[in-house]
Image (cartoon, grey):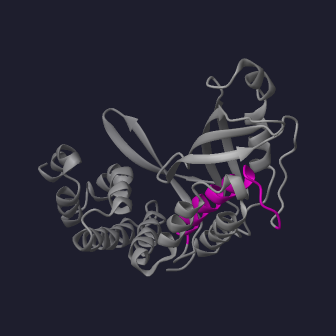
């Protein structure tokens, strides 16, 4: 599948109907919003870290993470919950991180331990490991891997590889902050494994179809129908595949709109079987 310019789908509700509208994104950058929950910290630490979210947000948004030729913006939202683990002069914390793209990619990690001195600047240094920024970098690259898989066949591989490199170095070199890095290595290796390739190829087919929504409905439906067939095979071979299930849950309304007026609604009948949770929505279209 050839590379394509990204098109975001927006569901616009009016009079009980939904329409799919394209929203082309223009800047070559991560656009992150960072929120912190400091209520579990001592009041002194809450005061010290009151600008921490802005600092992390600047660290992410001021950096060029990609060599993307398609001038795209990637929205990211990060929620951090911090707890104090300070012992001695070094300020230490444990943290939970929820990071997502406001759409269909999300990660949650509660095995995070890091050091951060109040007033210290967050800097990018690919040659060094840092218990805080290494984890931020790791999940940003996972988000990028998932996003670039939408734009070309296995296009996210370079970003998954970068995440893998960070995780492997951290697993053996993070010292007292090593917790969780073995699982992070396993996570990114699972994305690069051959068994995950059918899912990644399906994502490419689906988004290639989406790119034709406004100009060629037949071609859009053709490629999206192929994606549904691929989802069917993935879940037939692995009924518990969480990525395929989450993909359907995130995109079923889009697919309903794509095939709502199609003469052949076979893809929706397939989804009805794969996604019984939304049976009512499928039957509403299929039985009209």
Q: Which secondary structure is most common in the magenta stretch?
A: helix
Name the residue at 32% across, 52% down. Answer: 252
Give the number of marks.
Answer: 0
Q: Between 98 and 58, which is closer to the camera in this rendering?
A: 98
Q: Which residue occupies the foreground of this view, 64 or 240?
A: 240
| Residue 59, x across and y down, in percent | 79, 47
* Horizontal side of residue 183 vs 286, given as left or right: right
Up/down of 244 relative to 286, above or below: below
Above or below for 283 versus 203: above
Name of the residue lying farthest toward the top: 43
Q: In the rendered image, which quarter is residue 184 located in?
A: bottom right
Can see residue 57? Answer: yes
Write down the quadrant of residue 18 in the picture: top left
For the record, the magenta segment spans 127-151
135 part of magenta stretch = yes
**Residue 26 visible from this viewpoint:** no
Spot occupied by residue 12 in the image (x, y as percentages of width and height): 43, 40
């Amino acid at each position: 599948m050839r590379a394509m310019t990204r098109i975001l789908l927006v569901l616009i509700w009016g009079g009980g109907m939904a329409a799919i509208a394209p929203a082309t994104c223009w800047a070559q950058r991560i656009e992150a919003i960072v929120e912190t929950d400091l209520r579990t910290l001592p009041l002194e630490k809450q005061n010290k870290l009151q600008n921490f979210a802005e600092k992390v947000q600047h660290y992410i948004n001021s950096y060029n993470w990609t060599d993307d030729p398609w001038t795209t913006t990637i929205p990211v939202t990060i929620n951090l919950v911090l707890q104090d683990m300070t012992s001695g002069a070094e300020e230490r914390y444990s943290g939970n991180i929820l990071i997502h793209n406001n759409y269909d990619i999300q990660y949650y990690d509660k095995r995070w331990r890091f050091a951060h001195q109040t007033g210290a600047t967050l800097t990018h240094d690919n040659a060094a490991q840092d218990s805080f920024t290494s984890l931020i970098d790791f999940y940003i690259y996972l988000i990028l891997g998932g996003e670039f898989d939408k734009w070309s066949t296995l296009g996210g591989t370079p970003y998954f590889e970068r995440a893998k490199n960070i995780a492997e170095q951290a697993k053996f070199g993070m010292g007292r902050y090593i917790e969780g890095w073995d699982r992070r290595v396993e996570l990114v290796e699972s994305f690069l494994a051959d068994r995950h390739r059918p899912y990644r190829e399906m994502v490419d087919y689906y988004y290639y179809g989406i790119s034709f929504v406004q100009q060629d409905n037949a071609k859009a439906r053709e490629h999206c129908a192929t994606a549904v067939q691929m989802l069917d095979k993935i879940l037939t071979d692995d009924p518990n595949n969480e990525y395929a299930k989450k993909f359907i849950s995130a995109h079923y309304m889009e697919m309903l709109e794509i095939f709502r007026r199609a003469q052949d609604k076979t893809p929706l009948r397939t989804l009805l079987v794969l996604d019984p949770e939304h049976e009512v929505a499928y039957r509403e279209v299929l039985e009209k």
